[in-house]
Image (cartoon, rainbow, N blue to C red):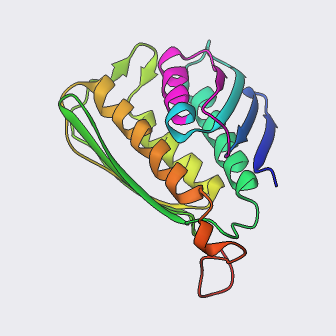
Amino acid sequence: MTRVGRVERATKETSVLVEIDLDGTGRTEISTGVGFYDHMLDQLGRHGLFDLTVRTEGDLHIDTHHTIEDTALALGAAFRQALGDKVGIYRFGNCTVPLDESLAQVTVDLSGRPYLVHTEPENIAPMIGSYDTTMTRHILESFVAQAQIALHVHVPYGRNAHHIVECQFKALARALRYASERDPRAAGILPSTKGAL
């Protein structure tokens, strides 16, 4: 049974296509027009072992906000679609990733209830290329809202903005991978006492 999600989203501001295979090998094809964001989405696919295709055309002549936000919304929706009925998955996942002087701790529950807790060091450099670093939280908010998951992301320390953001995406990738993988001991079982996720 394949676990693939495909979402197309078009507005006056952006046109987005996202395809994700949760049981892939980490192959990625990413093009948003925002170089650093492409790099982060590549980390998500490769470290999550998700086959991930993202093609976004946005109003970059205004700024990168709509492009980044709408891509995250489509990614969350595609991830939720790929999860299907969630029968037989681990449901919970966590990972801690260091990147030189920075550290990210990510914990996820594929609960069906969107909730985000996000902390990172203050006074991060405002830009990485054309990427506004305040968008990291907004990416996570948008992804969580559409994926319908509970996500806790904590960066207790770090100095370099590139490292601070990148370790979050790497840890997120691994946590999502662990949570969405099939549990061989729970085949056919929904991991919930409520009988619904």
Image quadrant occupied by the N terminus? bottom right
Q: Is residue 116 visible?
A: no
Dividing the picture into quadrants, the one containing residue 10 is: top right
Q: Which is nearer the eye, 2 or 105?
A: 2
- Which residue is at 47% across, 19% downward? 36
The spot of residue 145 in percent (x, y) is: 60, 56
Q: Which is nearer the eye, 69 or 76?
A: 76
Dividing the picture into quadrants, the one containing residue 28 is: top right
- Does residue 36 show up magenta in the picture? yes
- Does residue 74 show up magenta in the picture? no
- Examine the rendered structure and indicate whether residue 100 appears above or below residue 188: above
Q: Which is nearer the eye, 46 or 135?
A: 46
- The segment highlighted magenta reads 23-44
- Examine the rendered structure and indicate whether residue 109 appears above or below residue 139: below
- Examine the rendered structure and indicate whether residue 154 appears above or below residue 124: below
Q: Is residue 168 visible?
A: yes
Number of marks present in the image shown: 0
The spot of residue 66 in percent (x, y) is: 62, 30
Image quadrant occupied by the C terminus? bottom right
- Which residue is at 60% across, 81% downward? 192
The spot of residue 14 in percent (x, y) is: 73, 27
The spot of residue 23 in percent (x, y) is: 68, 45
Image position of 107 (left or right of 149): left
